[in-house]
Image (spheres, helix red, strand yellow):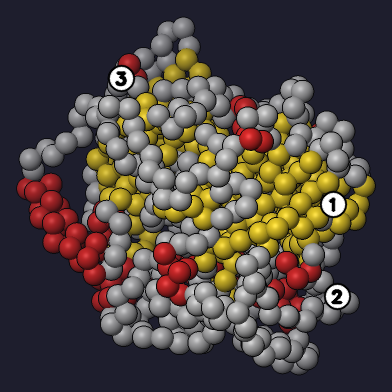
Amino acid sequence: MKAISCHLLPIKPPTSTPLPRLLPPPTYTTPRAISITAPSIPAPDTNASDDAVSAFWDYQFLFVSQRAETAEPVPLRLVDSALPLGFPSGTYYLTGPGLFSDDHGSTVHPLDGHGYLRSFRIDAAAGTIDFAARYVETEAQAEERDRHTGEWRFTHRGPFSVLKGGNMVGNTKVMKNVANTSVLRWGGRLFCLWEGGDPYEIEPRSLETVGRFDLAAGRRIEADDGGGDDGTVRAKLLDVAARVLKPLLYGVFKMPPRRLLSHYKIDDKRNRLLIMSCNAEDMLLPRSNFTIFEYDSNFKLLQSQEFNIPDHLMIHDWAFTDSHYILFGNRIKLDIAGSMTALCGFSPMISALSVNPSKTTCPIYLLPRFEDTKSRDWRVPIEAPSQMWVLHTGNAFEEKYENGDLHIQIQASTCSYQWFNFQKMFGYDWRTGKLDPSMMNLKRGQETLLPHLVNVSIKLDVDGNCQGCSVDNLAEWSKPTDFPVINQEFSGGRNTYVYAASSSGSRQALPHFPFDTVVKMNTATKATHTWSTGRRRFIGEPVFIPKASGGGEDDGFLLVVEYAVSTQRCYLVILDPKLIGKRNALVARFEVPRHLNFPLGFHGFWAPTSSSERHVSSPTRNLEFSHDP
């Protein structure tokens, strides 16, 4: 983080240097069955200096819309080394937004961009990788995209955006399930998830959208959680408020009654899928209702529990151990002024909420996963001695001592309440529809406000009383870091290694974000090792792939997408985790064809090929899923 100057980049780029000339919007014709044409955008100058102008355009090109789709697999060109021996066959799925601007003047926040699913199908025997990409055919996509002309017209505002090319005042079409946040392969089925609605099921090979899939439906196995209505005046008032809000949120703004969190968990030891949902109206009320479901590998519902927490929280990611679900309480509050402007259409709906830094601690709720773990009142949080906004969790595990004491450790990425801003994530300015990189690249000396990895340690006695809670840096690494991942086989258990996306700090104008480095952290020794991309190249979230033959915790491979914005190319990069920090860490690099170059992805999933999956037929469209009676 020794970069000097040019940390703050203006929303309007400097004009002292000629800017890349964008071509006019293309003329659309009736698309073929396989793909539609993407608009051609000239590449920035690869020899440009590391200045504010180049940085501004690098940042914009990381979020350029891609309209092209390909259902037929396209072979990727090998540009470095070769697919290594021992690499397992399988498919890496990556989801994220694909479209940010329509054909009528509206530009949306990256979180409101339509879901664009990418797949990299790896044939280890042949040493080849085939690429495919398609838009998730959500209900919003069907309404906003003309199937015959390929033209887009945004009609839904989305929670983070304001439409300029359509109706602004009185536009109640707010919630837009774009299925763009995460992807999951479970029980032979593939899903794209979003933070505020049902996931969409996708056919794994053709990437054709099957339809909405209600993961939280069916018979629920209720548990006696002790969190029911306590009969107080406050609780009754909140019930009245909820009854008033429901017709407005469900009927007018079309919000689903339950908001499914996009982050799921997989208990590899028990072979279970864990998902969580919350009530839509609780976003505006000082209470939080969470329901957690556990499924086996055949999607049989094994258990579900509901927890009513008397606090106004925003949960994006969470963790689990052998006996607990763990929620970091990101405190929020209702912004009255923002609510009024949001309801009138003058600001994004997310303006109704703001962070609540009223306390210097962070509440951590340890929710009992099973009946025999209810040894403490879970409604009383553990107050961590640090005010931190938790973005993503990497892993959590617990150790029980002979005297009954319990030691819980959680690895997570956190940032400061002073930096986190609902309306400015990714640097999006809803007033102009532009992306401002200065939001993600603070002045030198403010780096501690940005995301970094921590280890939270909680010690409980046999009765569940907290004997100590501490927050420490996960390793000796101070640069901004996010998207922590581990070897999935160690999820819920003690792990030594954590991998994440980070910044080298070597860029003068974009020192902190976008990320350009994969960091490997040793939680035992606190040592760190890194691999960085070339000049004006960025990366997304890494994914760990264990070797098929098994081995140690770091025996496997790392997959990460490299975004070479200076040449408008995307590469699938394979790294050797054991060699991170050494010159030969790069195992192979495959190039995506330029006409299929895609914007920054959010979260991915590795699905190894199994003999049974090779013969699975396509699921029936709109297939319902049921639970055992």
Specify few, some or many for label 2: CA neighbours under 10 Å numbering under 14, 14-19, or 20 or more.
Answer: few
Residue matched to label 1 = 589
Say which of 596 and 257 sits in front: 596
Q: Amino acid at mark 2?
A: Thr
When asked about the image quadrant of residue 28, the answer is bottom right
Q: Amino acid at mark 1?
A: Arg
Instruction: State whether residue 549 is above or below residue 136.
Output: above
Q: Horizontal placement of 179 versus 548: left or right?
A: left
Residue matched to label 3 = 371
Say which of 190 and 279 sits in front: 190
Mark closer to the observer (1, 3): 1
Query: Which element is circle 3 on?
Result: helix
Instruction: State whether residue 562 is above or below residue 213.
Output: below
Q: Residue at x 67, y 90 (%)?
A: 24
Q: Residue at x 39, y 56 (%)?
A: 196
Q: Where does residue 257 sit, x and y in percent of width and height?
A: 27, 53
Q: Residue at x 66, y 68 (%)?
A: 35
Which numbered disc, 1 or 3, marks the residue that appears first in the sequence?
A: 3
Q: Residue at x 79, y 78 (%)?
A: 43
Identify the mark at residue 515; answer none if there is no mark: none
Q: Where does residue 516 sit, x and y in percent of width and height?
A: 74, 57
Residue matched to label 2 = 46
Q: Tell whether label 2 touches label 3 (CB within 8 Å).
A: no
Separation of residues labelled 1 and 3 (CA atoms): 49 Å
